[in-house]
Image: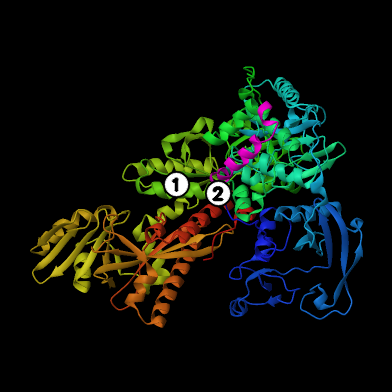
Amino acid sequence: MELSGKRFCMISDKEQLLQTLNMNNVPSVEVVDPKTCTYPIVGRRYGHDSGKNLAIIHTMNQALDEGHDFYTKLYAIEKEYYLEIDGLTVKNVQIAAGEHVVFHEIPIRTESFGWRWKAATVNDIDEEWINIAIRALYVTGLANGYVKIGKLPNETFIVVDINPAANVFCAESSNKPMSNFTIGADIEFMLSCDGELLPASTFFPIDGEVGCDARQIEQDSNEFALAEIRPEEAENSQKLFENIQSLIMKASEMVPYKNIEFRAGSMPFQGYQVGGHIHFGTPLSLSLLRALDHYLAIPVAMVEESSTARRRRKTKHGGLGRYREKTYGFEYLTLSSWIIDPKLTMSIICLARLVTAHHDELQSDILFNPLIQRAYYNGNIILLKQLWTDLKNDIMKTSSYLENKNELAFLFEAIEKGYPYYESEDIRINWGMTPSDQKYDQGLVIQIPRKTRVKYNLNNGHKAYVSAGKRLTQATIRAFPFTFSYGPAVQLSNELSRKLALPKGWNPKVTYENGVINLGPVIGIIASRPFDRQTTYFQHLCRLAAEKQMLVYIFEPKDIIWEQQLIKGTTFDGEGFFPFPAVIYDRYFFEGEKINEIDEVRVKLQTVFNIPFVNPMSLFKLTGNKWDCHLLLSKKYEEYLPETRLLQHSTDVIEMLDHYGEIYLKPIGGAMSIGVIRIIRRPIGVIWMEMKHNTVQQLMNLDELFALTNPLMNNNHYIIQEGIRRQQFKGENLEVRVYMQKNGKQKWFRTGMVARLTAGDVLTANTEKNMRVSKVLQQLYPDVSERHTILKEVAEISRSIVATVENEIGAFGELAVDLCIDQYNSIKIVEINSKPDNLFSQIRAFSLRNIAGIRLLNYAASLAGYEEEMNNELGGG
């Protein structure tokens, strides 16, 4: 791949230098974006002018006005050291000392600002930081140069700058390869039991030829995640391969279970990188390290699984130029675990030995181009493969190629034909090893992070009672292996998940009360199949719940298995059996005879099983009775309510019609416009309109009107309500829905408003259109102060209504207040709704849609005892 005719050097571009160091995971000065960063920052130029071009930038406007080339984070550097490095060796160390210091907002330790460098020793700097400085120079492609590092107040160091040496000759480059040397390895892998991480220490000792890597799942937990084979070093590739093969076989015999898999590659489980470290019985040199990176690491990268390889390359062991010097020679750390396939293993061993024996002939430096480095760290195999022809030709020119040709052919073919090796495969199968038919049972195990165990005084290895919803069992406590990824979540063994009727792979949060570990929150949504228009809403809630480590499932009354306290429910991932929930969100809409049936289920769940509802039955009873609701609201909001009477006499209809000219007859317990009748007095007579079926009758006299109204008066099932002439937007009647919700701290918030429009006189699911309130009111009320007054009144009425309702029936979690603006610009209350649809997605207000969903889930979680853990939201109210 031809990039330029001249060797690339990034040192002159300081921004590119710092970005390259960051890409290689070298602690260094951070480049920042002035539009998004925290101030103050440092403004800089691309070149180097002894610090004269540095400036402290305090605001974004200053950054944009002064026009620096790039910007970096501002650090409080207490000391600076200047290291002269030749190849992989520190030749000289100096420390900055002030002499005639020129004042600046930050110390700029250069001669131009009155600083000089005085002699120091390597012993003044921790060995780890010496190695970081050496690697910092290495990844720039320089053979020798000067690395400036700064000591921070927290006792850590960062690389501040790098400059080339005047003499480009590197003493190490004269080291000639050894023809005879040993080659060995330590290679890591992991155990997967039914898809979940199983600590390697479950079966393997810490030491020995088949053992465990020193990394523990938790400090002092004595549970070790990674297995490691340590084959004896060999004089040739074939012998090392045989040693590796025998140890994989031995490890397989120690774990004779068909439901446990051996996983290799880069990162079989998130956060756990595994490596295939190669031991070379020969001295390390700059030439050898460069050759291994170019001719071994890059070809192997072309067949690795990119998604995990790029994550490993950002760790301390992954990445270019990673090594450890040993008494026998050195250990090359860059490669992932390469024992996925035996043919691949043999190819890599042979290639490693060939490169080491001929490193003086393998002199590519293409990796030190930032474009190529970025491709390597991002796992861009397509770009890396453009290097393959040149790399392959160099390898084939070596004298050792022919004797290794057959072994190398497998890797070469995998690169050229695109055979990636997947980490989800059990490597034992590839190695021809078939485990027995035995299944390993972990038993009832719950893995809990240390912080949570300490909080609740739970001990690793002890037993405790565990509950989910309304199910209870006993389990053994173990350390949680993914604290760094999932925070306070826990992990359950498959047997414990089955015992508690929980889906496999769910990582719940925990509370602890009365000696019981409670897993959750488990939230059940009761609804009627088919879910129809609610399907999208339920999927959205399930998705949000999964992100917050909650379990949400949907069910209907017939799905309840009372005697087993199980429910056949539906989740985002499909159907299954679940425990009784800790909280229920009621989205069941019903008609006619089903009312008594669903009420019986609600009462049983609430009283017998003590399951709280987001909105209780008392709220549904109130909002489901228009007359009771009117009586309650009229105590405080009479001026905002249309005149309403109970239909008891025909004279009530005549009086209301005479007074308003337009009235509505509404069933007390009706919904969705069912049974609503509109009556209008016209000069030609009275018009009778049934809104649901859109039928119209013209009545010629009052007897005809009485004949239609008299049947409606039985059992006080109807109310009479004045007709309101509503404000219109582009010829359509306007209503405003205000969503009121409680959050995880059980405090009321106004989540948002939606403008609801209809060409008809009554909103129905078929005629309703929704828009942003702001867009509608801006056109209806161009005057900002008038618009603000209306919105403020709408908000105050809504907030006051939820307080009134709560004082009457007790606590609940959400309510929609529907209002309209009449022809006189007065606010009128239309109704309150205890089962409102989430309309925010219809107006493309997706952030409000998320906030509404999260507030609902957080409130439900608080009812289950998760107030502290669950009160974070995406936005305010």
**Whole-percent x, y for residue 269 in the image:** 64, 39
Write the residue at 75% across / 32% down.
228
Write the residue at 34% across / 71% down.
776
Q: Residue 547 carries which label?
A: 2
Q: Count how many numbered circles sit on residues in the image.
A: 2
Above or below, comparing residue 197 to residue 315 in the picture: above
Q: Residue 826 carries which label?
A: none
Residue to which mark 1 is pinned: 539
The answer to which of 661 and 705 lies nearer the viewer is: 661
Helix, strand or loop under label 1 = helix
Look at the image and give the residue range highlighted in magenta.
382-403
Above or below, comparing residue 675 to residue 284 in the picture: below
**Whole-percent x, y for residue 724 in the image:** 27, 70
Q: Can residue 612 be seen in this view?
A: no
Q: Can residue 499 be seen in this view?
A: yes
Question: The disc labelled 1 sits on which kind of residue?
Answer: Gln
Q: How far apart are marks 2 and 1 (CA)?
A: 13 Å
The answer to which of 7 and 39 lies nearer the viewer is: 7
Few, some or many residues within 10 Å of mark 1 (<14, 14–19, 20+): some
Write the residue at 79% across / 26% down.
234
Helix, strand or loop under label 2 = helix
Write the residue at 67% across / 77% down.
58
Q: Main secondary structure of the magenta part?
A: helix
Q: Quick check: 261 left or right of 769?
A: right
